[in-house]
Each structure stands twice: as structure tokens, then as C-alpha cells.
Amino acid sequence: MHFLDQAKIFLKSGAGGPGAVSFRREKYIEYGGPDGGNGGRGGDIVFEAVAGLNTLIDFRYAQHFKAQRGGHGMGRDRTGAGAPDLVIPVPVGTQILSEDKEQVLADFTEVGQRLVLLEGGMGGRGNASYKTSTNRAPRQHQPGEPGQEMWVWLRLKLLADVGLLGLPNAGKSTFINQVTNARAKVGDYAFTTLVPKLGVVRHKGREFVLADIPGLIEGAAEGAGIGDRFLGHIERCRVLIHLIDIAGQDPAAAMQTVRAELAAYGEGLADKPQLVALNKVDLADAELVAGFAKELRAAGADEVFGVSGATGAGVEALLDAVLAYLPDNTATETRGAEVEDASEDRGDWSPLG
């Protein structure tokens, strides 16, 4: 399954059916009169958040959605059939944006949430509805109201309790494989992870959803590397785990780089609680770990955890700290769902490609 978190689609609700012009014609009935029925109502465009979806890939292959028009009115005062609503299922966490992306039209945060975005047109009046004491044989009718139409953007923000971030090759994929049921790809090159990954952590009788996003580099807010496009997937997290490679050149500088990109992105990410974790401590001695932890605290980290995604060392203490930020009834509705890795070719998942 390929991952897609943005899609532009065209929507059009159904037009109302036209009213009928008809007169009663029956043997032995001297005064028949008009009996043209009204047209039926056009179908609405309805969005519904459903469980089991974690990507907008379906909208890559179908970008036009048009509801059916209402049925024609008929003689004998028969009203045309109303058209069924067109229900479009979307993953939980989907936002509907205006075509210019300036306005959020809807935000789906719960399974079963529904929204009628475009209403179908009303059916036109048949000639029977125009009959009066002075207009005994009307021939006018209405064609029915046209449907509404618009282009919108769909943007998916994965719902997770905890976000995992850091520079490329900080060991995030190894860490999420260690603590969750996810199976993220691991490689010794930058940007091994190209799309967000979800996994469920089960720790001390509680569960929460952990989201891993592609690594950030300096200038990501201006589009460097993969850019900051995927930071939206951790906007709704309650706490962030900032993973830092102890084998990197300068852990304190690495922390400041990522924090600067969060501040540049905005949306309150820089204000979220952050747990700083020195990863790959199995490759360093205790004295080096203590020295780097001291530097990180001096650079602004409240608490530093030494962990190893490969061996699991120190992970339990980090997860204990995470639980303190989560409510007792965690996890979110995306529990158990995983997002599979997309193709290595970035163009395979780009909505603009």
C-alpha cells in the first residue's frame, strides 16, 4: 500500500430533477386538469471518517466525484425519485481545505464523523403546483436547481499520541521497530524513511500510538531534504521524542537544528513537551554518554535518556516518562493500524507528480 497524504479532488452535488408538464387524460373524465409532478432532489456530497484507512492513495486514481441528479417529475402527480447521497470515505485525521488551501472546511478526528459538504439541488416544480382558480391549465414548470461544485484539497494528519523525530540516521526506524509492532525499513543512508510510519506501543498494561516521520535537516522549513511536509503528522501528538545519534558529530547542535525547524514550521510544535533521547548508547562508554547528556541539558533539554534502539537498553525508562504525558484511556482510534512504506521513488507518492 502506497502512502499519500495530500490529494486534490473535484466535487459536484446532484442537480434537482425537472418538474413535469402533464394533463390528466382519462375516458369519461370531463375536466382532467394539470397533474405534472415535481422533480426529485439531487444527491448530496457527504464525507465520512472510517476506520481502517491510513492513506489517501484512493484519491490518486479517482479525482472527480459527482452525485446523481434527481429523477424527473411525471404525470399523475408523481414526484421524481430523490438521488442517493454520494458518501466519500476518508481516513480519520483528514482535513478538507479550500482550493487555495487558506480555509479548513472540515476536520475529521473521530470514526463515524460525517459532513454534508455540498447539498444537492432541489427538484423543480411540476405544472400541477401552479394551478390556481384563475390559472386552470398552467404549462409552466421548473427545471430543478443545479448542483454545487468545487475543487478541494484533502490533507491527512495521522492521529498519534507520541511523535518521533530527529535528524536522518538518528535510529528512529530501529527504535520504532524495537518498541512497536511496526516493521519500518532500516538502512545506513540518509532518508531511509520516506513516509510516516505508525506503530502501537504496549507498555505496562497501556497502549499508545507512536508516529515516526522522515528525518529533518537544517533548512527543512525552506524545503531542504524532504522538507517539513510531514511535520503535520505530529501536530496532534501530546508529546515528542527527540532521538539524537550519540555517534553524530555534535548532539547539542543536532538538537538545536531540529528545534529550530519545529519553530520555523509553527503550529505549536516547538511548544510541545519533548523527551530527548541519546540513541545508540551501546556504541559508547558510560563516560561519553554522561558527557553528552550534560551538554544537552546545558543546551536546553529538561531530561536526557540514554537508549539503544538495537538492544532495547534504556527504553523502559523512556517509555515510563512518556506515559506521564498521556491520559489513562490512551490510545487513539488509529490503534493497531500501520502505514506501509511506499516506493523508494519519491515521485511515486507525490500528489503533484
Image (cartoon, rainbow, N blue to C red):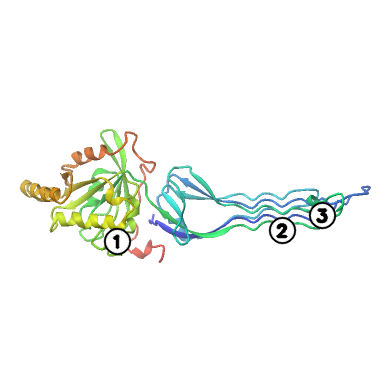
Name the residue nearer the viewer: 270 or 35.
270
Which SS class for mark 3? loop
**First-in-chain label (3 vs 1):** 3
Q: Whole-percent x and y of residue 294?
A: 10, 48
- The residue that disc 3 covers is 22
Tell me the kind of residue under disc 3: Ser
- Can residue 77 be seen here? The reply is yes
For marks 3 and 1, give the one nearer the viewer.
Answer: 1
Q: Which residue is drawn at 86% across and 54% down?
A: 137
Q: Residue at x 79, y 54 (%)?
A: 127
Q: Whole-percent x and y of residue 140?
A: 79, 58
- The residue that disc 2 covers is 143
Locate residue 111: give its quadrant.
top left
Question: Marks 1/2: CA distance?
Answer: 52 Å
For marks 1 and 2, give the one nearer the viewer.
Answer: 1
Name the residue nearer the viewer: 24 or 128.
128
Which SS class for mark 1? helix
Question: Marks 3/1: CA distance?
Answer: 65 Å
Q: Residue at x 45, y 47 (%)?
A: 108
**First-in-chain label (1 vs 2):** 2
- The residue that disc 1 covers is 221
